[in-house]
Amino acid sequence: MNSKDKENQENSDELFESLFKNALTRTRAPAADEARIRAALHAEWKQAVGRRRWRRLTIGLAAAASVVLAIFVYNGVFNDPTSQMPSLMVASVVKQSGRIMAGTGGTQEATQQLQAGDRLMSGSVITTAYDARLAMRWLEGESIRLDENTRLKLISETDIELLSGRIYIDSHADDRVPGGKGKLAVNTPFGRVQPLGTRYMTSLTGGSVIVSVRQGSVAITGNNEESIAEVGQQLIISSKGNVSLAPIAVFGENWQWIEEISPGFTLDDRSLADFLDWVSRESGHSLEYGSAAAETLARDTVMHGAVDLQPMRALELMLQTSDLVAEVHAGVIKIDTE
């Protein structure tokens, strides 16, 4: 290294020391992360020395440091700083009610209350309070709902971990494709729940995991064993490893909380038939048309606006403005002309 390079090295070291000393007064990054950032910024400086004036480079480095520090503040809330895996944006908040907190799960973690539109990173731990619920949109399009008193960790693009409480997942996979698998799996102390193109609910409470299947099927693997639950079945695995199956209705009281946190439906340039399909999917009721005329009218009726009501209540109000009527009985919504 010649004298000029040595002088530049000493000046850059002083610059970095000044930048990090002044910028990190709020939240200091972990030592290992800081070292990596110093190295990255220094490499950028060396590359730019030959083509930029020192004054312009100083301004650029200061801006870069500000961006990096802003990321640290953001990650301090939503990411686990002890994780060796790079953090990725995996979900976004669609709708929330009550107090929903996001943090890293540590004993001295920084937390932030979530609002609609917030983005969530892998490593985040989401906690819903009493009488609070959350609807999220996953990276691949899955819809995830959290019931009250629930804790959920976002592990990666393909895995989440249910720590306590109850969640519902609509994989948005095509249920008509045999063997089609959803990408998002739920990890529990009793096994890993892998969807097979489905909509299902997973509860972790009282020393047991309970998986209730509304559509499709799920596979639960643990202790080198696999159990399958089909539509209309509830699979229970106890803390002792005992497995049992029981029938369960795919609509009604057990699923009511999911409708209460439904993200709603955008009507713009969608048909009434699309809206009815949404009601069916959200409520668990099957949809039937009483006549070809009723189905044609539903498909030809174009709607505008948005609906942010519980699906069955939205159905009641929307049909008041059409020439169709609905009869709901034994889990079936039957649509016909007046």
Image (cartoon, rainbow, N blue to C red):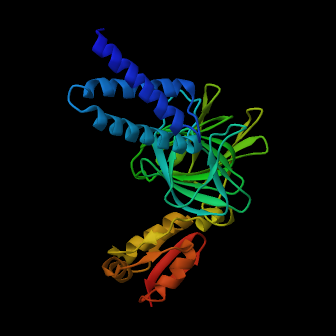
- Which residue: 51% across, 82% down? 326
- Which residue: 20% across, 29% down? 51
- Give the answer, above or below, for where 273 lies relative to 120: below
The N terminus sits in image quarter = top left
Q: Nearer the viewer, residue 28 or 130?
A: 28
The C terminus sits in image quarter = bottom left
- Image location (x, y in percent) of residue 104: 62, 40
Q: Is residue 2 visible?
A: yes
- Give the answer, above or below, for where 279 lies relative to 136: below
Q: In which quarter of the image is residue 206?
A: top right
- Image location (x, y in percent) of residue 254: 68, 61
- Give the answer, above or below, for where 259 lies relative to 290: above
- Image location (x, y in percent) of residue 245: 68, 45
- Image location (x, y in percent) of residue 17: 48, 27
Position of 12 compared to 152: left or right? left
Q: Is residue 86 visible?
A: no
